[in-house]
Amino acid sequence: MATMPPVDASAKESTIQLTTRNDRSVLMFLLHMLLRPFHNHVGRPGHARPEGSVELKPSPVGTKSSNVTHRVVCDMHVYDIVAKQPIPSDTKKRICYFGGGGWQTPPSSQHWGMCSRMAQVVPGATVSLVSYPLAPKNPAQNAFPWLMRFYREIMDTAEEEDEKIILAGDSSGGNIVLALVLEALREDDEDMGVETKRAPHPLAIFAICPSTDLTRNNPDIEKTAKHDPFLTPKFIKSTAKAWCGDMDPTDRRVSPINADISLLKKYGIHVHGITAGHDILSPDGILLRKKLEQNRVTGQWLHWEKQMHCFVLTYPYGLREAKEAMDWVGNVLKDE
């Protein structure tokens, strides 16, 4: 197993521990070259999904080494993934995972594989893969209040069952977990002095290549586009439009970078994440990381140059960078 290089010396005084990588394997380079001619087609949403939460069929990739059970929470389908040979622990952890897909596509086999791996390497962990309502039939103005009810329910249940909760997601899923926690903190902060009991919140957020600003106005998006083998500016603008619906793209509930980041520090919530140098969403992801640092929010971040959007999802295919990044993810989650 390869080890990550030491944290940058310049980052020691920061609340964000940043690990940087610049290498790229021949196989990953070839994958980028293979994807580039088809980047207007690969991974794009197909037919529009129905209203509500879609019931999923667990992928064989996710069930090979894990057991999966299905339940419904607030009319949302949830799939609890537990390793067949779990690592014992005195602490119960639940990682609620929201898969990416432009807010329009259900979790892929890669998501199932990554969630299964998390369940195998994190002691005492159950990974709950959430099938959340998808655009365009469930735009944010309809889906976000529903997601907030779901968030409150899972947090209340976790408190009753003495579970540590981590909300995690990639791409659009990373957007959702950031927006949910920040909006819940805003509501609760306004209610301080009214509520007699503090509302429960997660221990941490883990955002992999998150979509943080749906205005898509960052000029570095176009600069990065020439290197991105997977995403295009046109595509990410279309997915943002589908999710926003009638909401203003600057609204904090769809663009969490515009929320009050200081609340994460105030409530002691860690924020970890990954950005990739050949990902047009990375400029906004890096801006979020810098805002977290400015607000003294604690977290561990990995930035890997020459890697594409959500490269960690290639883990089930055995690519070196994905395996090493997945090891890094596992170590961060173990420490929570």
Image (cartoon, rainbow, N blue to C red):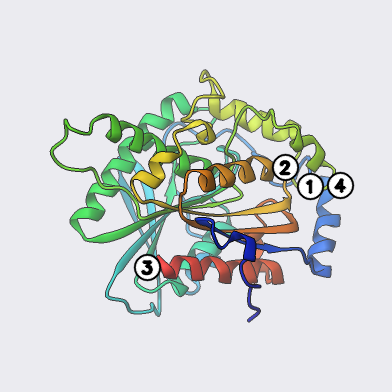
- Position of residue 190 relative to residue 306, above or below, is above
Q: Horizontal and vertical percent for residue 262? A: 42, 40
Mark toward the start of the polypeptide (3 vs 1): 3
Alpha-carbon span between mark 2 and mark 4: 17 Å
Describe the element under mark 3 as helix, strand or loop.
strand
* Residue where numbered disc 2 is placed: 280
Q: Horizontal and vertical percent for residue 115? A: 49, 62
Please give the name of the residue rendered at 76% of the width and 42% of the height, measured from the top-left corner.
41
Question: Where, by quadrant of the figure, is residue 159 drawn?
Answer: bottom left
Pointer 2 with pointer 1, Cβ within 8 A: yes
Which amino acid type is marked by label 4? Pro
User: How many numbered circles are shown?
Assistant: 4
Q: Is residue 216 left or right of residue 177?
A: right
* Residue where numbered disc 4 is placed: 37
Q: Is residue 94 left or right of residue 36?
A: left
Q: Which quarter of the figure is the C terminus placed in?
A: bottom left
Describe the element under mark 1 as helix, strand or loop.
loop
Alpha-carbon span between mark 3 and mark 4: 40 Å
Which amino acid type is marked by label 3? Ala
Q: Horizontal and vertical percent for residue 165? A: 34, 56
* Residue where numbered disc 3 is placed: 125
Alpha-carbon span between mark 2 and mark 3: 32 Å
Q: Is residue 121 left or right of residue 4?
A: left
